[in-house]
Amino acid sequence: MLNPADPPQDTGSRATTYTALAAGQDFRHELEIKRSRFITVLRRVDGEEAARELVADLRREFHDARHHCSAFVLGPDRAVQRSSDDGEPSGTAGIPMLEALLKRETAPGVTDLSDVSAVVVRYFGGVLLGAGGLVRAYSESVSSALGLAPLVRRSRLRICAIPVPHAGAGRLENDLRAAGMVMAPTSYQDRHTVLRIALPDQAGALAAATERILQLTAGSSALTPEGTEWIDELLG
């Protein structure tokens, strides 16, 4: 049974899958580099306002830190990309952090991480790192955190309804599962049960599923598309 992490949405995105942080609490990781502390915080976000809220939250929590540098990537197509050096020399913090997000491989040869805001809080330790040292430190801070953070595969699935009499709903659901269909939540009406299946949002999937339903129900039931949902699946 599928449990969407977010409400149904139809973004019109070209991408039908991408990778994101697992929903839930922020993920934190700390490095010490030449006596400076680099505290990286990652948060799953769904928009620019939420991404910037992470910066504001950490400014309050780590109010005595010298820098709160940030980067975020948003959307299935990663169309929104922002970064900030927050007082570090230009190009030594925000951009390396953003590149660490963009270049993170989520599978061999695949770089599709999105919907993530990263903030690196720096406590200066008294040793100057130089421009090259800062670039490496901020990049390594984000990369190290991502290497330990839980990730999910987000897939855009088309939800389709199948109204059937109450008496036949259980048998049809079993047949659908046996046929390899992925079930979405069922609802119960006064006169019938509405079974729902989740199909890949790809050309041909709806036609193939429609034909299969007609076979399983001897032509008595048909699919009704209800829109799309982004579904999370935890990566191993």
Image: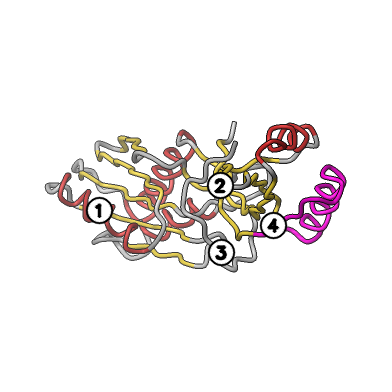
Q: Mark 4 or mark 2, which is nearer the start of the sequence? A: 2
| SS category of the residue bearing label 1 | strand
Residues at discs 2 and 3 in contact (Cβ within 8 Å)? no
- Residue at the spot 44% in from the left edge and 38% down from the top edge: 144
Q: Mark 2 or mark 1, which is nearer the start of the sequence? A: 1
Q: Nearer the viewer, mark 1 or mark 2?
A: 2
The magenta segment: 202-225
Residue type at numbered disc 4: Asp
State left or right for residue 202 relative to residue 13.
right
Q: Position of residue 201 (x, y in %)?
A: 69, 57
- Residue at the spot 42% in from the left edge and 39% down from the top edge: 145
Q: Nearer the viewer, residue 86 or 206?
A: 206
Question: What colour scheme was applied to this rendering of the protein?
Answer: secondary structure
Give the numbered dot on residue 201: 4
Q: Is residue 34 magenta?
A: no
Residue type at numbered disc 1: His
Marks 3 and 1, how far apart at CA: 34 Å
Q: Nearer the viewer, residue 11 or 177?
A: 177
Q: Mark 1 or mark 3, which is nearer the start of the sequence? A: 3
Give the numbered dot on residue 68: 1
